[in-house]
Image: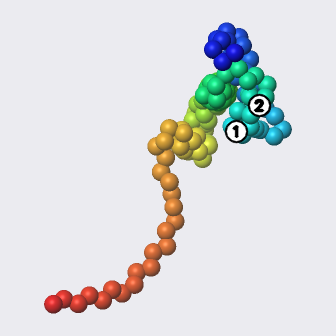
Amino acid sequence: MAGDRLNKVEVQERVDKCLELRYNSDRPILQKEWIAYCHDNYGDKSEQQYHAYWASAKEKYEEGWRAKLDGMLEPAMEVLLELLHSDNNQVRQRAIDQVLKYSGNDIDKQQVDITIKEIDTQWG
């Protein structure tokens, strides 16, 4: 029924189903397809609640990616530290460039071709 509360396990099962259909299937579903799926398979909650499952699935997906990236960060930093201690100047410079790039402090080098044209001005 629309007024019955689901327990945490039941809510999590729905969020997991949304996560599966949205991110782990051959053809990810759209939000409107998810809402239709909920009506067809559950039919016990409001569309607002089905939208909440959709949003929760996205949060769970992003948390999973953050965890994976955090897990890769430490080994990557160890490699960069090793490269910073290299005897090869080129290797050290590339490692420095990567540190600057990922910290947001890199300098974007662009080649610019400037052509100066004559400008006529008249006064008075």
Please say whether residue 96 is visible from this viewpoint: no
How much space separates mark 1 and mark 2, taking CA atoms?
A: 9 Å
Under circle 1, the secondary element is helix
**Between 95 and 31, which is closer to the camera in this rendering?**
31
How packed mark 1 is, by other alpha carbons closer than 10 Å (few <14, some 14-19, many 20 or more), is few
Q: Position of residue 68 (x, y in %)?
A: 68, 26
Q: Secondary structure at mark 2?
A: helix
Please tell me which residue is depicted at 57% across the width and 35% down the height of the picture. 84
x and y, in percent, of residue 44 in the image: 71, 20
Q: Quadrant of residue 67?
A: top right
Residue nearer the viewer, 76 or 123: 123
In the rendered view, would you say 110 is above or below 114?
Answer: above
Tell me what residue is drawn at x 45 percent, y 75 percent: 114
The colour scheme used to paint the residues is rainbow
**Which of the two labelled residues, at mark 1 and mark 2, occupies the earlier sequence position?**
1
As drawn, the label of residue 32 is: 1
Locate residue 78 relative to residue 21 in the image: left or right.
left
Q: Is residue 7 left or right of residue 118?
A: right
Number of the label disc, if any, that sits on residue 86: none
Is residue 123 at least partly visible in the picture?
yes
Residue under pointer 2: 37
Identify the residue at image location x=39%, y=84%.
117
Point out the image quarter for the C terminus: bottom left
Image-based side of 84 in relation to 18, left or right: left
Q: Amino acid at mark 2?
A: Tyr
Residue 54, image x, y percentages: 66, 29
